[in-house]
């Protein structure tokens, strides 16, 4: 369960942002949508959904990119560029794009994530010096790296040394034969061996101290923290037989399509023997042992393809109890579909494993107090002078006074009259009129 993700000096966020998934204590609406997990520290609570609003180029996608970038760095184990990045985010593979662009001073990019998994609370902090924006020649190094388990510091590492190593909290996870009395000796050995551009977590801490704990953390980043960039161009497929030419009709995907009003054909997944990739096919006819169909890209609408493409990963997240972060989840989808998905993540009778969904959007229809809590609604806006983005939640507004936001307020109406900010008053009329005048004079 994701509790908090914060980041500094990343893309449009000069002063950083804090994406909080911990419910506001004073909020009382939609209590059934709050997740809980008992840890050694306390019973932690988390929101099951969060939706991000803001105008184009405000920084909504930067938040998704930051999560994807940190995830990729942890899985790679270093801050070197990736030769083959499949995340769909060029920032994750070319880290010179990560720092805030409009700043002459080079300062570290800092990531800080808190989450629970298996009854344990983790907090992992990594500050990375990447130079200034687009500086490919800068010496990259880990400026600071810290790991906390159940709110207790386990290690504190700077560029060239391990300054603190405290292992008592993770006694049950230490490597076989390791003794706590060797901690100081291990700290000195790791300090002598530390590599400036590699994470201590997955290198020496893994080798010397706790493979088991590192595996748990890496598994969360790999399987429980699903971040999808450019989701309008990404497709997900259910498990398939590996042999070429095999085909599979997924009953549940087709039931979802029918429920959404897609009644033209069934859908099948086929392993293409020529490209060795999985294709989505629209089944026009089927016999006992043969499917006759057409490549879905050729006959289906964008909205149909979008729904069929994302549902396998949505179902997988719900099954695993994962955090699903998607850039523009609702692109080309009818709002009723997305509203139903939000309600499913809120439904503890269906979402039994505590999955969470986070996405950005331009559609104001989800600004409804019957659908989302105030602390689940986030806004991003960008200062025209500094070009820096800022993130805040609807719950940050007072409950009383002129700018009050109560749980029964008309969120959508207030958003459009700019009571919450994060919206632009746009009028292209004069610009287009001038363009057309210019075109007439050219004629």
Image (cartoon, rainbow, N blue to C red):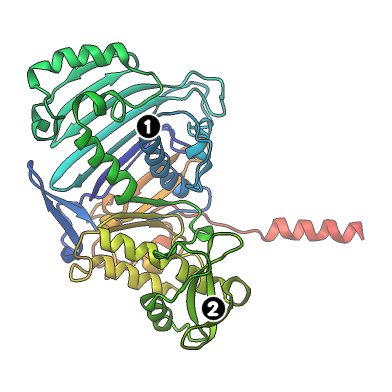
* Left or right of 202 on screen, residue 14: right
Q: Mark number for residue 440?
A: none
Give the camera-side residue of 219 and 403: 219
Label 1: few (<14), some or many (≥20) within 10 Å? some
Residue 351 screen position, x and y as percent: 23, 66
Q: Is residue 132 left or right of residue 197?
A: right
Q: Residue 376, position in %: x, y?
A: 29, 57
Where, by quadrant of the figure, is residue 144 drawn?
top left
Q: Position of residue 387 (x, y in %)?
A: 51, 37
Which residue: 14% across, 52% down?
Answer: 25
**Residue at point 12%, 26% (across, down):** 167
How would you rate the neighbour count of disc 2 (Cα within 10 Å): few for under 14, some for 14-19, many for 20 or more? Answer: many
Q: In front: 185, or 264?
A: 185
* Element on which disc 1 rests: loop
Residue in the image at 12% along x and 24% along y: 178
Could you give the CA–CA distance between mark 1 and mark 2, rounded to whole angstroms? 41 Å
Up/down of 96 relative to 438, above or below: above
Do the residues under discs 1 and 2 have CB atoms within 8 angstroms? no
Q: Considering only vertical position in the picture, is 42 above or below 77?
A: below
Question: Can the viewer see residue 293?
Answer: yes
Instruction: Classify residue 197 as left or right of residue 165.
Output: right
Res 282 label: 2
> Residue 302 or 167: which is nearer the viewer?
167
Q: Quadrant of residue 254?
A: bottom left
Residue under label 1, please give it: 77
Residue 350 image-quadrant placement: bottom left
Mark found first going from the N terminus, 1 or 2? 1
């Amino acid at each position: 369960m994701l509790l908090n993700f914060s980041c500094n000096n990343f893309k449009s966020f000069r002063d950083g942002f804090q994406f909080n998934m911990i419910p506001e204590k004073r909020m009382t609406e939609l209590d059934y949508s709050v997740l809980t997990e008992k840890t050694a520290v306390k019973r932690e609570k988390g929101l099951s959904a969060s939706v991000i609003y803001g105008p184009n180029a405000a920084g909504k996608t930067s938040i998704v990119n930051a999560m994807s970038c940190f995830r990729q760095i942890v899985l790679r184990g270093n801050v070197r560029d990736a030769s083959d990045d499949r995340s769909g985010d060029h920032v994750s593979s070319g880290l010179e794009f990560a720092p805030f662009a409009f700043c002459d001073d080079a300062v570290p990019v800092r990531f800080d994530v808190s989450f629970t998994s298996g009854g344990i609370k983790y907090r992992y902090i990594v500050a990375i010096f990447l130079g200034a924006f687009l500086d490919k020649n800068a010496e990259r190094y880990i400026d600071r790296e810290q790991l906390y388990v159940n709110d207790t510091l386990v290690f504190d590492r700077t560029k060239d040394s391990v300054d603190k190593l405290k292992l008592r909290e993770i006694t049950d996870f230490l490597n076989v034969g390791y003794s706590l009395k060797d901690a100081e000796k291990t700290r000195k050995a790791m300090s002598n061996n530390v590599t400036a551009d590699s994470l201590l977590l997955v290198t020496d801490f893994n080798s010397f101290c706790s493979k088991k704990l590192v595996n748990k953390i890496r598994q969360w980043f790999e399987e429980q923290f699903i971040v999808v960039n450019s989701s309008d161009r990404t497709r997900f497929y259910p498990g398939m037989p590996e042999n070429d030419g095999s085909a599979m009709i997924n009953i549940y995907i087709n039931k979802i399509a029918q429920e959404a009003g897609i009644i033209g054909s069934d859908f099948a997944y086929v392993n293409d023997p020529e490209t060795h990739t999985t294709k989505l096919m629209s089944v026009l006819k089927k016999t006992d042992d043969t499917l006759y169909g057409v490549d879905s890209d050729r006959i289906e609408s964008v909205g149909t393809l979008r729904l069929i493409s994302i549902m396998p990963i949505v179902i997988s997240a719900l099954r695993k109890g994962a955090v699903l972060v998607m850039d523009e989840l609702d692109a080309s989808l009818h709002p009723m579909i997305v509203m139903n998905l939000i309600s499913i993540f809120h439904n503890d009778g269906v979402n039994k494993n505590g999955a969470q969904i986070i996405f950005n959007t331009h559609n104001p229809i989800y600004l409804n107090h019957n659908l989302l809590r105030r602390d689940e609604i986030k806004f991003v806006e960008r200062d025209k002078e500094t070009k820096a983005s800022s993130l805040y939640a609807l719950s940050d507004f007072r409950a009383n006074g002129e700018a009050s936001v109560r749980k029964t307020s008309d969120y959508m109406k207030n958003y459009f009259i700019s009571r919450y900010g994060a919206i632009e008053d746009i009028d292209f009329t004069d610009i287009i009129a001038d363009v057309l005048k210019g075109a007439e004079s050219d004629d």
